Structures are given as structure tokens and as C-alpha cells.
Image: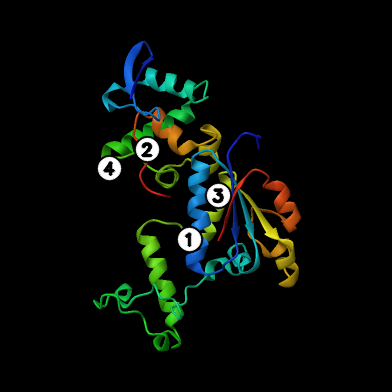
Amino acid sequence: MTQDNRHIAFICSKGNLDMAYPALVMGWAALGNGIDVTIFFTFWGLDLINDKRVDHLELAPVANTSMKMTMMGVDTGNLGIPNLMGVLPGMTAFATKLMKDKMDKLEVPPVREYLQMLVDGGANLYACKMSVDMMELSMDDFVDGVKDIVTAGDFMDMTEGAQVIFI
Amino acid sequence: METLVLAGQSVEVNEEGFLVNPGDWSKEIAVDIAKQEGIDELTDAHWKVINFCRERATETGSAPTLRQITTGSDITTKELFALFPKGPAKKVAKISGLGKPEGCV
């Protein structure tokens, strides 16, 4: 990593399917433009690099005011999906499938493949030590390409001068 | 807009260095643009990428994104970043005489 090269660091703290993509999309764009990329996964964000979880990230319609009935193909304008409906068994799976299908149509790769693209493009992936300890995980639990488990202090050192984006 | 002399021919480029008139492109000009982008020599592997991009652009009307290059050919992401280091998205399109790729992936 050269000193004068632009460097962007993402902190991924969420494990929902919709919150997995911002860092992946922007990180990939950054690599394509020659910018150094570091991604730090903390708390629920560890699900994104957890080998057992990464293919099962979900999107819950409950308390999500942006999810409208129209997204399910019902022409109801701005009417939201009622929370009462969202709690029904299968609704989270349904919303997740809806989003995955839409992403698929746009040829957006699934999270696991996206992560591999970023690693192949030269991004540095790290897991947060405190979250790893709390969730009783180890390097064996992570997908290939995660470089290390590091402390918050390590993250500060490795992102000196970088632009940091918290997700 | 700016006029540059590439491969002994004066061509117009926009503020980011992309050719304004795609018709100006030639293999010799590609070699010169590559040099400006820090790639001293265009190898067969580079040409495979460039040719793929130009063919795809003829079909679709726009420069392919990096992922469209890797899914549409046998070039891997790693190879693409090794062949066109420090920003392959723009470099590939620029050397191929195409506009900036449209699309986020």
C-alpha cells in the first residue's frame, strides 16, 4: 500500500442481507478505480464472513418502513407491509427471496461471491477481535480471504489517513 | 476536451482521458494510451481483455463492467487486476477506446 494512494475503509456492523451490500458495492467500485480497500467486520457484520451464515443472510419486513406492499407486486401505492403481517411465519424468508430475486435479475452476485471478488481485487478483510471473542468464533469459522482477527487499535493503525465509512 | 498526439495522430480526449471519437481508436493508439496508464507493454493477455471489451461494446453499445468481463470470458478477477493494476475499470475501457463502464458491478 503506497502512502499517497487513496484508501477507503468500511466498518460492517450489520448482518442483514440489505446491509451487506453497501460495502461490497462501494468497495468493488473503489478497487475498480484503483483505491485501496479495507473492510472491518464487527458485531452482526461478522455474519457476512461467517462461512455458515453468509449464504443465509435475511431481510425482515418487520419495523422496516421502506418495505411497501408494492414490492410484493400489489398495486397499493405507499401502503407499507403491516407489521402484524410481517410477524407471520415465512414472511422473513419471503422478503429475503424477493430481494435475492431482484438482485439476481440485476446480475448482482451473492454475498459470498462478491466477497471473493473483493479479495481477488486486493481488498483487505479483517474481523473484530472483541466481537469474535464475544461470539466465540475463530478464523476457522470465516470464509477464505479474511486476513486476520484484529483489535480496534489495530484497525486505527491500518486506516491512518483513510476515509472511513460505518455501515 | 483536449487534443493529444497518440501514435503520431492527433486525437481528442475528454477531461478523464477517454477518446471522444471511438472511430479514432487503433491498436497503435491503444499501445500509447496503455503507456500513459503505466502499462509498458500490451501482452496477448491484455489483448484478450481489450478484444473482449470491444466486441461486447459493439453488441451492447457500452463498455462492459469488470464483472461482465470476468463472467463473459475466461479471464479471472485476479488476472484482470494483475494485468491492469490500480484501477482496471477505467483503464481497460480507456485503452479499449470505449467510454466509462456503466453499471456498479
Q: Which mark is residue B60?
A: 4
The amino acid type of the residue labelled 1 equals Pro
**Residue type for callout 4:** Thr
Q: Are marks 2 and 1 in contact (CB under 8 Å)?
A: no
Residue A42, placed above or below residue A84 = above
How would you rate the neighbour count of disc 1 (Cα within 10 Å): few for under 14, some for 14-19, many for 20 or more? some
Which residue is the site of mark 3? A118
Q: Chain of mark 2?
A: B
Q: Residue at x 50, y 73 (%)?
A: A58
The reply to whether callout 3 and callout 1 are in contact (CB within 8 Å) is no
Kind of element beneath mark 4: helix
The Cα atoms of the two marked residues, 3 and 4, are separated by 26 Å
Q: Which residue in the rendered view is the most extreme toward the top?
A: B8
Instruction: Tell whether A116 sits left or right of B100.
Output: right
Against B67, residue A14 (above or below) is below
Q: Is residue A165 above or below residue B8?
A: below
Identify the residue shown where x is 27% and y is 36%. Answer: B58
Q: Amino acid at mark 2?
A: Lys
Q: Position of residue A92 (x, y in %)?
A: 46, 79
